[in-house]
Amino acid sequence: MKITIIYDNCLSKPGLRTGWGFSSLVETDYAPPLLFDTGADGAALLYNMKELGIDPGQIGTIVISHAHGDHTGGLASVLKVNKDAEVYIPASFWGTLPGRKVTVVSKPLQISEAIFSTGELQGIEQSLVVKTGEGIVVVTGCSHPGVGAILKAASQHGKVYGIVGGLHGFQDFDQLDGLSLICPCHCTQHKSEMKSLFPAQYITCGAGLKLNF
Ligand SMILES: [Zn+2]
Ligand SMILES: [Zn+2]
């Protein structure tokens, strides 16, 4: 199982573009690659994919965490070059995607063999729950529903091993106790506090980062 950060506010691999927003690719042995969020800018998203050797045409599933432009901005560009991917949007997402197989997510659901959605939490956002050999890895967009609520929803599937993604203004840090991997990305405001509290678990996020499980 592999997670690649394609689009982020920060840089992990020189030569990629950065921008306010988030996008990541989740690859498992069981299903075609899954794109989780699409950043703010389609040109930058496709540029980074090309640099990372990711063929947008191979993406089988696109999941949008929530309807903010820094997560949906690149969607139209990806859909232009990928005619087949099915799309999972939270119920609060606006607009339609004609000609696509679209699943509107409210309740928790299974997306593929090893990947689940928490369902739309607090009427705003869904997160990914990925089953890995190490345990559950949660991938978040901005964590607007709150990290505690997201981890609670994810733990229905087993012990949570790690969290990757935007954590926004989260600072109730003891919610992270017991996690083995903490990789705050994108809009996370309190990265330095988390790094000093969990130095062994902390991974610095940026566009180009690859995590293997
Ligand atoms: Zn965001
Ligand atoms: Zn947001």
Image: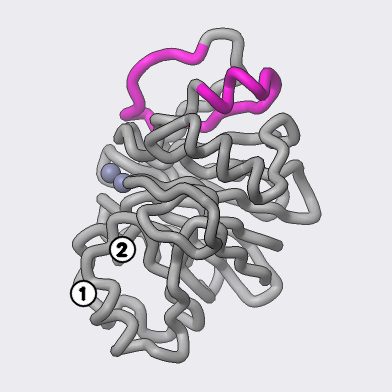
**Residue at position x 67%, y 71% from top?**
213
Percent across and percent down for residue 151 are: 39, 65
Label 1 secondary element: loop
Q: On the picture, is 118 further left or further right than 79? A: left
State the extent of the magenta-drawn residues as a range: 77-97
The residue closer to the viewer here, 170 or 202, is: 202
- Which amino acid type corresponds to the residue marked 1 in the rendered image? Asp
Rendered residue at 70%/62% (across/down): 1
- Residue 129 shows in the view: no
Say which element carries label 2.
helix
Residue sitting at x 65%, y 41%: 50
88 drawn magenta: yes
Q: Is residue 106 left or right of residue 85?
A: left
Give the labeled residue for mark 1: 172
Residue 131 forms part of the magenta stretch: no
**First-in-chain label (1 vs 2):** 2
Residue 147 visible within the image: yes
- Tell which of 99 and 25 is nearer to you: 25
Where does label 2 land, which residue?
Answer: 147
Q: Is 58 in front, or is 16? A: 16
Do callouts 1 and 2 mark residues in contact (Cβ within 8 Å)?
Answer: yes
Q: Give the vertical position of 207 relative to 180 (above or below).
A: above
Q: Residue at x 51, y 38 (%)?
A: 45
Residue extending farthest to the right is: 29
Residue 191 percent across, percent down from the top left? 29, 73
Q: Residue furthest top?
A: 98
Residue 188: quarter of image: bottom left
Number of numbered discs: 2
Q: In the image, what residue type sits under mark 2?
A: Val
Place of residue 63 in the rendered image (x, y in percent of width and height, measured from the top left): 52, 38
Mark 1 CB in 8 Å range of ligand 2?
no
In percent of width and height, residue 128 lies at: 50, 52
